[in-house]
Every structure is written in C-alpha cells, then in structure tokens.
Amino acid sequence: MPQEVQPVSRDSYPWAIFLIFLQLGLTSFGGPVAHLGYFRDEFVTRRAWLTERAYAEVVALCQFLPGPASSQVGIALGYSRAGFPGAFAAWLGFTLPSALLMMAFAGGLARYAGGVSAGVLHGLKLVAVAIVAQAVWAMAKNLCTDALRMTIMVVAASIVLLMPYAWVQVGVIFLAGLLGTRLFRRESVAMHEALPLASSRRSGVICLGLFFALLLALPVLVHWMPGPVLAMIDVFYRAGALVFGGGHVVLPLLQAAVVPAGWVDNETFLAGYGAAQAVPGPLFTFAAFLGTAMTAAPWRYLGGLLCLVAIFLPAFLLVLGVLPFWQSLRALPGVQAALSGINAAVVGLLLAAFYQPVWVSAIHQPQDVVLALLAFMTLLVWKQPPWLVVLVCGALGYVLW
C-alpha cells in the first residue's frame, strides 16, 4: 500500500520565509538579545518550526561563532526549512528594512551635510555612549559572574586599550579561550538537541574552506592589486569574520579601519552608529551606512550594498559550514570552558570600545555626561525602546547645541 505523501508546508518555500523574516525585520527593535526573543516567539511558540531545546542549541552555536548572532540564528532557521535558498531568504528579509534605512540616512547626510544640525549629530553620538554602556553592563552581569571572569575582562580591556590593533583583539580572544579551557573545564556537558536539517559534511567543508580562503587571500590581493573596492571588501569581510560579541564589538574594528584611512570622518561614523540604534533589525547593517557614506556618487548605494554583503558573508559561510559538525563539537568537554573565557574577553573588548572611540569622541563637557547618563537610565532602568531614546537625544542635541 503506497504511503501517503505529506504536503509541503507553505512556510517551507523561500518566498514565504522571506515574508516571515521581512515582518520581523520591520518590527524587531532592541538589539540582538531582543531579536532572539522575537525569533523564539515566532518559530518555537507560534509556528513550532523546532523545539525549545533545539532553538537553544542554535542560539548556543551562533554565540560560539564570530559575527552577528541574531542574523546567524535567522540564517540557520531559514536553512533548516528550505536549504540554501531558505537561508538567503531569511537573511534578506530580516536585513533589508534596516539596510535601506541606513543607506538612505547616509545618502541624506552626503547630500544635505550642511543642513544637518551639528547638535543633532552630537546627540546621536551621545546615544552611542548610552547604548554601549548598557551593553557592557548587561554582558558583564551575565558573563562575568566571578572573580576569574572579571579579571579576564579587565585584562582584555587593558591590553586592547594599550595596543589598539585588530590583530591584538584576535589574539586576546584566542588566549582567553585557551585560558578558559584550563580554568573553567566542566566534568559534564548538558544534554543537547541538534537542529533538524539535512546538511552534508561535504557542503560544510566547502563553506569553511571558502571562509578561510577569503580571510587569507583578500589581504594578499589588496597588497598585490591595490584599489578602493577590493580594500573595502577586505576590511568589511575581516570585520564580519573576526568579531565575537555582535555589532557593538565591531565598532572599534571598523572605526580603526575606515576613519584613519580617510574613508569617512569620525563625526559621520558616530552619527551613523547612533542612527543605527533607531532602526529595527541587525546592527551589522551599519556597514551599509558606511559603504554609502564612503562611496562617491553615482555609485554611492552600490558601495553600501557591497559593504553590506562583505560583512555578512562570513556569517553565512560559518553557519552553513559548522552546522553539520556542531552536534559532535558541542559534546567536547573543553568547548564550554573555552567559551567561558572567550565571553569574558568579549566583555573586555566592549569595555575598551566604550572608552575609545565612543566616550572620547562624544563626551567633552558636563552637559554631555548629563545627557548620556539620562539616555543610559532611560534604556536600562526605565526600559524605553532605543529608537525613542535616539529621537529624544537628537531633538535635545538640536536645542542644546
């Protein structure tokens, strides 16, 4: 007797996945932690795409990898429903609204730079102070829970402040992972449940190979074939490939790459970072703002698209490359211990970024401290959404400065 053919669920088609994530991309304010909450409500509670334990496993994987954790979770969920087209559809839907808004903001700054109040731009920079301070507070509270972890945090911040180079940040994260395997090794690993998908290890090896090939080859190509386009791809790909901790930690890497090179001035950089807090979706779409601001007309928006793709490409390759191996990797006793050390170091990197360039570039007088402190309290204590804080600080900046 022939088996009954089960109909394919409507939300397993790439176009349906795109529409689901587009709705999330239009409404997901509040940063990566909030995004993960929206995803859980949508895909575990409402649509039952996967179980609570499987969702927690996906989140654990994406926190282990460098890059934008919430976007990587979305990519993994789309991949589990419809393979590579589903992964792309999920990323595009979640990223498109904020990317378009950030590119439009950069285009407006370039066209009407003289008409934008310096006070408004200064207010946006003060929002960045409050946002990063909130991230430092929340991450330290959750990830630095004892004296050893707090020590790693402080040492990591000190090293990065004294030696503000991209390779130093990578080295600090690597050493913190090694130290974690010695200090935080656990005897048992919690039960886990893999994401339900049919992914081959061959495709995983190909994706991981491409990830490392681009990471190593792009700097060589820039050296042998210097040019602005290839240099931009290299900078943004490396930022997406080497950043642990999400969008806030990518700030010092990008600032150190694009401002000293003269691609964008520091005022525009921090104004865009402040504006990024007012839009929904992933903070990594800040790359679309920078690419648009750095590129001359008539190719301005093409530059924004190029930088956007470059910074997200490592997230794709890593998620799709590691997924087939994650279940066995997660069972290794040293992985969780290494993550404990890495997470503490990430908080230290964020603490260093809070001082330089965020605090140094925005705080110049007592009024700046007062407004930044009020914005911080509004976010942390009074629980107001970031977009509202951005609007209020921009308006106060216009009035006060």
Image (cartoon, rainbow, N blue to C red):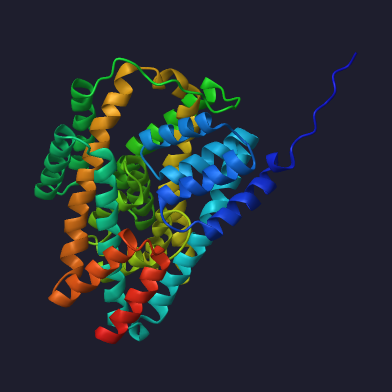
Q: Residue at x 20, y 32 (%)?
A: 176
Dividing the picture into quadrants, the one containing residue 177 is top left
The part of the image, by quadrant, that contains residue 166 is top left
Q: Is residue 13 left or right of residue 96?
A: right
Residue 30 point in image, percent of width and height: 42, 57
Quadrant placement of the N terminus: top right
Q: Residue at x 58, y 39 (%)?
A: 44
Compared with residue 325, is residue 91 higher up or lower down, i.e. above or below?
below
Asked whether 86 or 399 is in front, the reply is: 399
Residue farthest to the left, as pictured: 162
Does residue 6 appear left or right of residue 86 in this picture?
Answer: right
The residue lying at 26 percent from left, 71 percent from top is 267
Does residue 69 sit above or below 300 in this rendering?
above
Name the quarter where the C terminus is drawn. bottom left
Please indicate, yes or no, whether residue 290 appears anywhere in the rendered image. Answer: yes
- Could you tell me residue 295's position as x and y percent? 39, 66
**Residue 383 placement, left or right of 86:** left
Image height of 301 relative to 312, above or below: below
Measured as percent of width and height from the top left, residue 16 is found at 69, 47
Residue at horizontal 39 percent and vertical 55 percent from the top: 229
The residue closer to the viewer here, 273 or 202, is: 273
The answer to whether residue 170 of the structure is visible from this angle is no
The spot of residue 318 in percent (x, y) is: 43, 34
